[in-house]
C-alpha cells in the first residue's frame, strides 16, 4: 500500500527549501500522479531528478511511480537513493519496504517498516505492511500485534481486520478469526476477499452450508472472483450437488484458465458423475498447469482404473509417488493395480510403503496379508492380518484371512 501522496509532498516540503520552479513542477507531477497519469508524472519526476540529483522527494516519488508500474527492483533502488539524501523521512522507508515486500525480500522490508515506525510511530499503513511481512516470516504473534496497532490507529481499517483474521486462523483462534472477518465486512460490506476468507474458515470447520453462503457473498461482491467460484464448487461437490458444482468449476476456469485447482475440482466432480473420460482430461489440464500436482496424478489414476486402463493408471500412481514419496494412498492404489496386473511381489512392496507411511492403514495391511498368503509366505501374512485386526477389529475379511493362514500353519 503506497502512502498518501499529498502527505509525502507536505513532509518533503517541510524538510527541504525547494526552488520555486522545482516546487511548481513537483506539485504538477504529484497532481498528475494522483490523477492516475503515471507516465506523464514519471517524466516530470525524472526531469526533476536530472535537474537536481539531490531532490530526495522527486527521487522518492519516481520510485513510487516505478513501483506502481511493477518495476519493484528499480523502485527499491530509487527510494534507497532518496533515503541516502534524507534519512529522516518515514514515508521513504514505508514505500521502500513495500517494494522489497513485492520482491519477497521480507527481512529487508521488515527493517524498513521498523525504521519508519521508529521515526514516526503513528503510521497505520506501516504497521499493516509490517504485519504482512511478519506473517510471511512466520512471526505470527508479532504480525497479530502489528495488525492490532494498525487498527488502534485507524479503527475503520478493513484490510487490517482481514489480515488479522488470516493470522488468527493460522494460530487456530477460530472464533476470533471469524469475528475479525465479520468486522472487516461490517466496515466494507462489499469486501469479497473477507467473505472468501470467512467461507474458508467455515469450510475448515465442516460448516458446509454456511461456507456456501459466504462463498456466494464473495461472488456477489466480485463476479470475476475465480477462486470463490472454485471454492464454492468444491463445497457443492462435498454436498453432493454435482451439476451446479460443475458449473462453478467451469466458471472458475473461464475466469482463470491457468487455475490448476479448478481443473482438479472439475475432475473430481466428473468422477462423481462417472464421466471418467472427461475427468482424465480435466486432471491432464490440472497437471499441465501445475506439474507438481501429485493429487491430480492420483485422481487421474483412479479415473483411468475405472476405465480399465490399468497400465496408464499405474503410470499416474508412479508419478504421484515420485512427486510425493510419502503419499500412502497412492502406494496403496498402486499396489492394487500391480496385483490386478499379476505383479504380486511389486504389489507387496507397494503395500509395504503404504503401511510404512501410515502405520494405521488397516486395508493396506489386509491386502498385503492376502498377497503374502497367495505367495505362500504364511508367517508374514499372519502378521499382516493381525496388524489389520489390531487397527480395525471389525475388519471381517482380515479375521477370515487370519483363520485360513492359521489352519494352513497348523495342518
Image: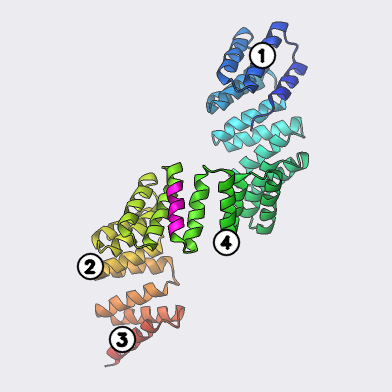
Q: Which residue is mark 4?
A: 209
Q: Which residue is mark 1?
A: 28
Q: Earlier in the sequence, mark 3 or mark 1?
A: 1
Q: Nearer the viewer, mark 3 or mark 1?
A: 1
- Could you tell which of marks 4 and 1 lies nearer the N-terminus? 1
Q: CA distance from mark 3 to mark 1?
A: 90 Å
Could you say where residue 54 lies in the image, as x and y percent from the top left? 66, 12
Determine whether label 4 and label 1 are within 8 Å by CB. Answer: no
Q: Disc 3 versus disc 2: distance between alpha carbons?
A: 24 Å
Other residues around mark 4 within 10 Å, as few (<14) / some (14–19) / many (≥20): some
In which quadrant is the N terminus drawn?
Answer: top right
Q: Secondary structure at mark 2?
A: loop
Q: Which residue: 26% across, 70% down?
A: 339
298 magenta-colored: no
**In which image quadrant can residue 274 be found?**
bottom left
Percent coordinates x, y for residue 404 in the rendering? 31, 87
Q: Nearer the viewer, mark 4 or mark 2?
A: 4
- Horizontal placement of 318 versus 153: left or right? left
State how many labels appear.
4
Distance from disc 3 to disc 4, alpha carbons, whole Å, reads 49 Å
Where residue 405 is drawn, which disc sits there? 3
Q: Earlier in the sequence, mark 3 or mark 4?
A: 4
Q: Earlier in the sequence, mark 4 or mark 2?
A: 4
Give the residue pinned by disc 2.
Answer: 341
- Does residue 154 appear in the picture of this structure? yes
Q: Secondary structure beneath disc 4?
A: helix
Region in magenta = 243-251
Amino acid at each position: 500500500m503506497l502512502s498518501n501522496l499529498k502527505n509525502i509532498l507536505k513532509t518533503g516540503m517541510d524538510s527541504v527549501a525547494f526552488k520555486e520552479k522545482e516546487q511548481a513542477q513537483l506539485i504538477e507531477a504529484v497532481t498528475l500522479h494522483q490523477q492516475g497519469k503515471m507516465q506523464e508524472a514519471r517524466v516530470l519526476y525524472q526531469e526533476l531528478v536530472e535537474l537536481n540529483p539531490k531532490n530526495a522527494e522527486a527521487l522518492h516519488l519516481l520510485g513510487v511511480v516505478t513501483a506502481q508500474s511493477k518495476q519493484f527492483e528499480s523502485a527499491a533502488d530509487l527510494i534507497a537513493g532518496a533515503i541516502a539524501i534524507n534519512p529522516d523521512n518515514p514515508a521513504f522507508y514505508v514505500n521502500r519496504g513495500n517494494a522489497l515486500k513485492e520482491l519477497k525480500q521480507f527481512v529487508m522490508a521488515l527493517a524498513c517498516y521498523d525504521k519508519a515506525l521508529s521515526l514516526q510511530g503513528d503510521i497505520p499503513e506501516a504497521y499493516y505492511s509490517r504485519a504482512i511481512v511478519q506473517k510471511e516470516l512466520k512471526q505470527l504473534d508479532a504480525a497479530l500485534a502489528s495488525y492490532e496497532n494498525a487498527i488502534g490507529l485507524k479503527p475503520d481499517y478493513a484490510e487490517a481486520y482481514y489480515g488479522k483474521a488470516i493470522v488468527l486462523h493460522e494460530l487456530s483462534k477460530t472464533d476470533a478469526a471469524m469475528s475479525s472477518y465479520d468486522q472487516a465486512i461490517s466496515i466494507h460490506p462489499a469486501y469479497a476477499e473477507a467473505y472468501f476468507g470467512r467461507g474458508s474458515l467455515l469450510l475448515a470447520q465442516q460448516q458446509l452450508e454456511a461456507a456456501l453462503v459466504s462463498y456466494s457473498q464473495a461472488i456477489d461482491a466480485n463476479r470475476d472472483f475465480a477462486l470463490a467460484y472454485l471454492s464454492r464448487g468444491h463445497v457443492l461437490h462435498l454436498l453432493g450437488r454435482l451439476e451446479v458444482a460443475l458449473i462453478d468449476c467451469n466458471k472458475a476456469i473461464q475466469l482463470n484458465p491457468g487455475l490448476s485447482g479448478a481443473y482438479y475440482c472439475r475432475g473430481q466432480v466428473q468422477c462423481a458423475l462417472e464421466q471418467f473420460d472427461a475427468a482424465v482430461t480435466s486432471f491432464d489440464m490440472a497437471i499441465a498447469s501445475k506439474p507438481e500436482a501429485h493429487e491430480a496424478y492420483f485422481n487421474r489414476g483412479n479415473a483411468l482404473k475405472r476405465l480399465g486402463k490399468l497400465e496408464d493408471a499405474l503410470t499416474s500412481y508412479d508419478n504421484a509417488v515420485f512427486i510425493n514419496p510419502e503419499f500412502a494412498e497412492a502406494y496403496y492404489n498402486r499396489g492394487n493395480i500391480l496385483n490386478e496386473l499379476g505383479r504380486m511381489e511389486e504389489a507387496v512392496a507397494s503395500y509395504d510403503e503404504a503401511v510404512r507411511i501410515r502405520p494405521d492403514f488397516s486395508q493396506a495391511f489386509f491386502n498385503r496379508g492376502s498377497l503374502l498368503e497367495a505367495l505362500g509366505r504364511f508367517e508374514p501374512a499372519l502378521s499382516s492380518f493381525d496388524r489389520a485386526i489390531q487397527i480395525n477389529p471389525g475388519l471381517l475379511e482380515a479375521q477370515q484371512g487370519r483363520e485360513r493362514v492359521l489352519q494352513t500353519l497348523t495342518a
